[in-house]
Amino acid sequence: MFVRMIGKAFLRQWKKMLMIAFTIALGASLATAMLSVMMDVEDKMNQELKAYGANITVVPKSTSVISELYDVDDENISGKYLKEEELGKIKTIFWAFNIVDYTPFISTQVKLDSGNEVTLTGTWFNHHMDLPTGETLDAGIASLRSWWTVDGEWIDEQTPGSEKCAMVGSGVAKRENLKVGDTLHVEGKKDALDLTIKGIFDAGGEEDDLIYVPVDTAQQLGGLEGKIDSIEVSALTTPDNELARKAAKDPSSLSVSQYETWYCTAYVSSICYQIEEVVTDSVASAVRQVADSEGQILNKTRLLMILITILSMIGAALGICNLVTASVMERSQEIGLMKAIGAHNPAITALVLTEVLCTALIGGVAGFYAGIGFAQIIGHSVFSASISIRPMVIPVVAVLVALVTLIGSMPAVRMLLNLRPTEVLHGR
Amino acid sequence: MSLLELKNVSKIYGNLHALDHVSLKVEKGEWLAIMGPSGSGKSTMMNIIGALDKATEGEILLDGEDISKKNARALTDIRRDKIGLIFQQFHLVSYLTAVENVMLAQYYHSIPDEKEALEALDRVGLANRAKHYPSQLSGGEQQRVCVARALINYPEIILADEPTGNLDEANEEIVVELFRRLHMEGTTLVVVTHNPEVAEVAQRTIVLRNGRVDHETVNENFTGKIKHITLQ
Ligand SMILES: Nc1ncnc2c1ncn2[C@@H]1O[C@H](COP(=O)(O)OP(=O)(O)OP(=O)(O)O)[C@@H](O)[C@H]1O
Ligand SMILES: [Mg+2]
C-alpha cells in the first residue's frame, strides 16, 4: 500500500518531483565535481608544480657562498665537490617520503671538433634506485625537466650503451649544426669520447648551451670520478609559518619541543636541514618562491572547492525547502484526511520523506554522473589532465545529499506535523 | 450506558461560544440527526465528538471512556479505531482509485485487504467502479466511496457532517438509503444536515442554536424500514 501510494503520488506530482530531482542533481553534481577535484587536486597540483622543477638545491659548503655570489671557478678550493656515493642517503631522511625526485649534476668543460669549448654536464636521466625501504624510484631530469621540448628522445639509462649518448641543448646544436643521431666527438680534460646524440632539447633558457650526458661519462671526461657539483631536489613541503622562518635562520635557536615540531613537519627548511645532515659538507637551500607557493596554492584551492560545495548544498537545501513545502501545502487536504482517518504523524512524515528521498536518490545519481563530467571539464581546462574519481566521493556525496534533503524538508515536515485536520476538512 | 455522552461541553473561540454547555446522550445503535442554522455549532460539535478537536471544557465519554483530556496521539488512535467520518466535500485522495481510497483507511488501521475493501464497495453498490479514480466518479458515487471508507474498519459510530450537502436529490436518496441499511445492521449514526428530509428519517433530531441545544424531536413514525432503491 505504502509503495503503491508513493508510486501514485509520484506520478501525480511528477513535475514538482522533477524540479526537486533537478535541484538535487544540480547540487550533487557540483559537490561531486568539487570533491573529486579536491581529492585529486593534490596529485594534480604536485604534478603541475613539479613541472616547475626543483625546489631545493644542494651544493658543497665551500662553494655555496662564493660561487653563488661571484660565479668563480676555482678548482683548488678543497671540498668543492659532493660525494656521489652519498646521493642515496637523501632518500633515507625523516621526510624521505616527501622527496619526489632529485638529480645530481657534475660539469666539466669539453672541446668540440670545431674547436669551441662547451660545458658538458653529467646528470641522471631516469636513474633507477632500489631504496633500503624496499621502494624503487626513477629519478632524474626526464621528470624534473618535463617541460623541455625534445627533438629525438630522452636518454634511457636502463638501455645498454646509454653512457655513450648525449642530449644537446638547442643553442649548442644550432651553433655546431648538430642533428639527432649525429656522432659528437668531445675532448675533455682527461679523456676523449665519441657520443651519439640521442636528443636535442629546447629548455628555453641557459641550459640550451649545455650538453647533458650520464654522470659516469662526464666524470670520465673530466677526471672527476665519484664527484658531484650540486643536487636538485623536488620535495613536497608544508607552507612556512613563524616557526619555520625562525628555524630557517638558525635551528639551534629553537627550544627542544619547538625543534621537534619543526623537525617533524615537512617545512622546506627542515627538509633542507635533514639533507645537510646526510650529505657531508653540503648546504641545502630552498628555491623560495616555488616551495612556498606550492603548499599555499594547494590550501587555497582546497578552501575554494569546499566553499563552492557548501554553497551549492545550501542552494539545493533552499530549493528543496521551497518545493517540498509547496508540495505539502498543495496536499494539505489529503494529509488532513489521512490524519482524520487515523494516520499518525510519523506515518505521514515517512510517506512524504520517502517520496522526497526517492526523488533525491534519482536526482543524486543523475547529479553524480553529471558531476563526474564537470570534474573532467575542470580537470582538462585547469590541470590539463583527467580527474580520477575517488570511491570516497560516493559516500560523501550520498551523505551530503541525504542531509541536504532532510534539512530542506524540515520546514515542510513541521508544517505537516502542525496541520490540523479540522482546518482543512471543512473547507474553511 | 450510552455509547456517547457529552457533559456540559463548551468550545470557546476568543469570546465566541461556538458550543455553550451542551449535554447530549447517544445510545448504541441510535440514529441521530443534528440540525440548526449556519454557525450554530454543528460542525464544532461533530469535530469534538469525532476526536478531531478538543473541547474547551466539559467531558466527552465515548464507550465509557473520557476522551476530553487525551493527547493528539491518543485521539488519533480513537479516530482510527472507533470513528467513521464522512464529510460534505468527500475528501477522497485524488490519485488513488475508489478501492485504494477504502484500503487507505484499512492501511492506517491495520493491514489493507483488497477483497474486504471490494466487499465494502459492493455494499454501497460500487463494485463495478472500484478501479475508477475520484475524478471519474459522480458526486454521489464519491460520497458512497466515503461511506464505504467510513465503515470499513467497523467503527463504533459513524459521523457524517452534511453528507448530502453537495448531492442532488437522487443521490441524496441513495445515501440516506445506505444510512438506513447501516442503521439496520446496528451502526450508530450521527448525521448533521440542513435538509429536513434527511433529518426526518432519523430516530431523533436535535436542533442547535447559538451553540446550545434549542430543542429535540423524536421521530414518531420511525420505522427503519429499508426502501427498495437500486444502488446502481
Ligand atoms: N477555528 C475557529 N476559529 C474561530 N471561530 C470558529 C472556528 N471554527 C468555528 N468557529 C465559529 O464557531 C461557530 C460555529 O461554527 P460551526 O462550523 O460549528 O457552524 P455550523 O453549525 O457547522 O455551520 P454551517 O451550517 O455553516 O456548517 C461559527 O460562528 C464559526 O465562525
Ligand atoms: Mg458546518
Image (cartoon, rainbow, N blue to C red):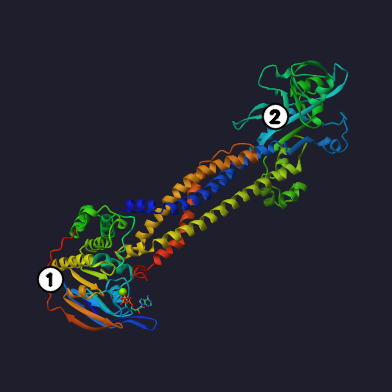
Question: Can you give x and y, in whole percent of width and height, for residue B91 in the image?
Answer: 31, 63
User: Where does residue A240 sit, x and y in percent of width and height?
Assistant: 71, 48
* Nearer to us: label 2 or label 1: 1
Q: Is residue B130 above or below residue B15?
A: above
Q: Chain of mark 1?
A: B
Q: Which residue position is annotated with label 2?
A: A140
Q: Quadrant of the N terminus of chain B?
A: bottom left
Chain at tag 2 = A
Q: Amino acid at mark 1?
A: Gly
Whether residue A365 is visible here, answered yes or no, is: yes
Relative to B139, A135 lies left or right: right
Residue toward you, A274 or A333: A333
Dot 2: what SS?
A: loop
Marking on residue A374? none
Tell me which residue sits at (71%, 45%) in the image: A293
Task: Please state which amino acid type lies under the numbered disc 2.
Answer: Gly
User: Element type at marker 1?
Assistant: loop
Mark 1 lies within 8 Å of ligand 2 (Cβ measured): no
Q: Which residue is mark 1?
A: B224
Q: Is residue A161 left or right of residue A75?
A: left
Disc 2 versus disc 1: distance between alpha carbons?
A: 106 Å
